[in-house]
Image (cartoon, grey):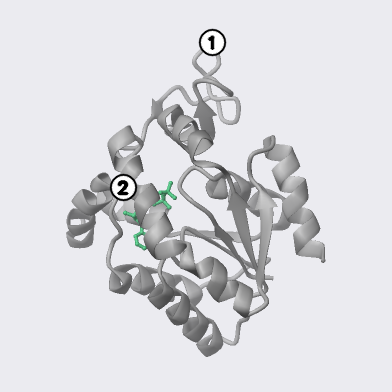
Amino acid sequence: MNIILLGPPGAGKGTQARMLVDERNMIQLSTGDMLREAKDSGTEMGRIVADVMARGELVTDEIVIGLIREKLQGDTGGGLIFDGFPRTLKQADALAELLEENGQTLDKVIELRVNDEALVSRITARSTCASCGEVYNDLTKPIPADGKCVNCGGTEFKRRADDNAESLKKRLMEYYKQTSPLIGYYYAKGQHCRVDGLGEMDEVKAAIAEKLQG
Ligand code: ADP
């Protein structure tokens, strides 16, 4: 089963994707993670995208479509989770073509609904373990007092360069302008379903599981 997790920055797409990977052997394809890897590895592409990402703007369709094209040729495991892709109508059309070329289908598009106030507080309080990527939140899930990651025991934590109020404003704007039209696009194709992303992580997980069954 191949699915898209759709929603604004901070909606919980990455967190839910990680749980689906652990429990269902699915493969997470996060264009945000791929772009951050490119940035950290100091490649030509990494240099091009670093500033764009820090400003909260979208990287070009050509770059992200290229990244996804490469991944679709690899192992598809227990199904693919597209996280942060597609983000524009052009990317959505490209994904449909790429899946068809690879003999794959898109089964469900799950929109995680969260109000803007919650997004701002989630994102500006967010940090992750530098070794395993476990997500923490200063308000709801602080880094343990002993300074060790609950998942892997790692002791280094990082904050994303674009997790600040100014860049978040831009990312939200981009979401409403460029990405939210995808809700109608997939609704028209009969693939869209919506989940309340405001609940506890496990409640959201259960709601997603229900949609994946139905
Ligand atoms: P978030 O959903 O929290 O904003 P992501 O990790 O998905 O975070 O993306 C971080 C940044 O990477 C985006 O603000 C954008 O600059 C870039 N990016 C990620 N995916 C795409 C995409 N599909 N198209 C264009 N830019 C993207």
Residue 77, image quadrant: bottom right
- State which quarter of the image contains the N terminus: bottom right
Please state if 153 lies on the left or on the right of 107 as rendered.
Answer: left
Residue 158, image quadrant: top left
State the image coordinates of residue 81 (x, y, percent, origin top left): 58, 62
Please state if 26 lies on the left or on the right of 31 as rendered.
Answer: right
Residue nearest the observer in this picture, 87 or 156: 87
Question: Regarding ligand 1, which quadrant of the image does it lie in?
Answer: bottom left
**How far apart are the two marked residues, 1 and 2, measured between alpha carbons?**
33 Å
State the image coordinates of residue 56 (x, y, percent, origin top left): 29, 48
- Say which of marks 1 and 2 sits in front: 2
In the rendered image, the vertical position of residue 163 relative to residue 37, given as above or below: above
Please state if 1 lies on the left or on the right of 58 as rendered.
Answer: right
Judge the density around disc 2: few (<14), some (14-19), many (≥20) Cα neighbours within 10 Å.
some
What amino acid is found at the position of numbered circle 1 in the picture? Ala
Please state if 187 lies on the left or on the right of 90 as rendered.
Answer: right
What amino acid is found at the position of numbered circle 2 in the picture? Lys
- State which quarter of the image contains the C terminus: bottom right
Q: Is residue 133 visible?
A: no
Q: Residue at x 68, y 77 (%)?
A: 190
Identify the disc placed on residue 145.
1
Q: Residue at x 27, y 67 (%)?
A: 60
Q: Secondary structure at mark 2?
A: helix
State the image coordinates of residue 72 (x, y, percent, origin top left): 49, 75
State the image coordinates of residue 159 (x, y, percent, origin top left): 37, 31
Q: Secondary structure at mark 1?
A: loop
